[in-house]
Image (tube, rainbow, N blue to C red):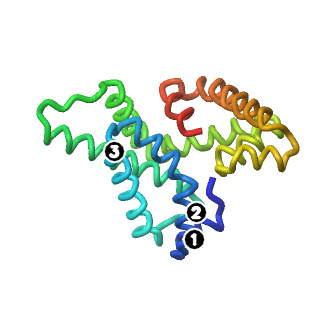
Amino acid sequence: MLDYRTKLELKKGNPKAYREVFRFLYPRLKAYCNLFIGNESEVEDIIQEVFITLWEKRRSIKTEKSVEAWIFVMLRNRCLNHLKKNRLEQEDFEVNNLKIKDLQYLYQLDFMNKEEKSLEEKLIDSLKFAIDGLPLKMRKVLVECKIKGRQQKVVAEEMGISLKMVEKHIAAAKKHLRKKLLKEYNRFIFLIVSLI
């Protein structure tokens, strides 16, 4: 989760904050985009377009709102546009129907009620809540390794536990998060788990 300071610095045009946002979100954006776009170079292009748009529109960032959700909405819309464009260009274009239906479902959910949070914001809130419900040590390992992207070996040394224990905490945390989030987001659990 991006903190207020990072969002404010990004809004001001601080390149360091921009790099931090990129480093923090890139793996999740790539996993999300890969669910819908099969070509690696096209995925990279779409993500690059999203970050160019982010930079161009940085002054419109609302620091009290989720920048991550805004970026995921931009990415989802670019994926939709890309799929539509390819479908029009290629008569024999075939895509896994489940993915198209899920993508359309995401799109429809997002715009059904303007007063509600977007699906991405709800997912982020639910994920945060589920992470907060983890035991302290497990939560710390998950946040350090999977959210902050730190090396497991370094985290193990800092916490005074074995590398094997770090791996066990991560596996247990993922299992716990899957179970918690499956109830609420059964249809999109594959997406949630791929982002952690």
Residue at 40 percent of width and 49 percent of height: 75
Residue at 35 percent of width and 24 percent of height: 98
Per the model, the C-alpha gap separating discs 1 and 2 is 6 Å
For residue 95, above or below residue 107: above
* Marks 2 & 3, CB-CB < 8 Å contact: no
For residue 117, above or below residue 184: below
Could you say which disc has been placed on residue 4 in the image? Answer: none
Tell me the SS state at disc 3. Answer: helix
Q: Position of residue 99 (x, y in %)?
A: 36, 29
Tell me the SS state at disc 2. Answer: helix
Disc 2 crowd, CA 10 A, few/some/many (<14, 14-19, 20+): some
* Residue for badge 1: 16
Could you say which disc has been placed on residue 20 in the image? Answer: 2
* Residue for badge 3: 79
Disc 1 crowd, CA 10 A, few/some/many (<14, 14-19, 20+): few
Tell me the SS state at disc 1. Answer: helix
Q: Residue furthest right?
A: 160
Disc 3 crowd, CA 10 A, few/some/many (<14, 14-19, 20+): many
Quarter of the image for the C terminus: give it. top right
